[in-house]
Image (tube, helix red, strand yellow):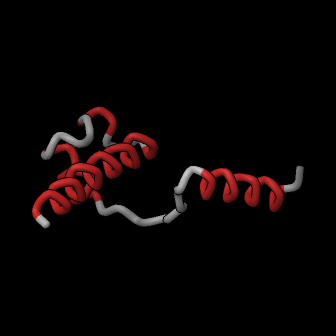
Amino acid sequence: MSRSSDRMALLRARRKRGLRYVGIEVRDAEVSELVIRGFLAEQDRHTTLAIRDGLHRFLDVTLAQFRRAL
């Protein structure tokens, strides 16, 4: 498969699971805050996938709290 068809296949697979890809830059201070708040282990602070997972946990908890407050 070509690179463009690989990207399209990934896009379709994500959409099928209800996901969107959003590339963002994360500040060192934000990574530190994830560690402080327990969403990211200190030893994983330089691992991209661990940071992504920590951000997912943060969003899940924060948005759940917001929904409960409504």
- Residue closest to the eye, 53 or 17: 17
Q: Is residue 53 above or below residue 24?
A: above
Q: Answer with left or right where residue 55 lies relative to residue 48.
A: left
Percent across and percent down for residue 47 are: 41, 41
- Residue closest to the eye, 59 or 44: 59
Taking the view exactly as shown, the residue that stands out farthest to the left is 69
Q: Is residue 22 above or below residue 51?
A: below
Determine the residue positioned at 45% across, 42% down.
49
Q: Is residue 70 above or below residue 39?
A: below
Determine the residue positioned at 40% across, 49% down.
52
Determine the residue positioned at 18% across, 53% down.
33
* Number of numbered discs: 0
- Point out the image quarter for the C terminus: bottom left
Q: Answer with left or right where residue 18 lies relative to residue 44.
A: right
Percent across and percent down for residue 27 are: 30, 63
Determine the residue positioned at 28% across, 57% down.
28
- Residue closest to the eye, 3 or 67: 67
Taking the view exactly as shown, the residue that stands out farthest to the right is 1
Percent across and percent down for residue 50 are: 39, 40
Percent across and percent down for residue 66 are: 17, 62
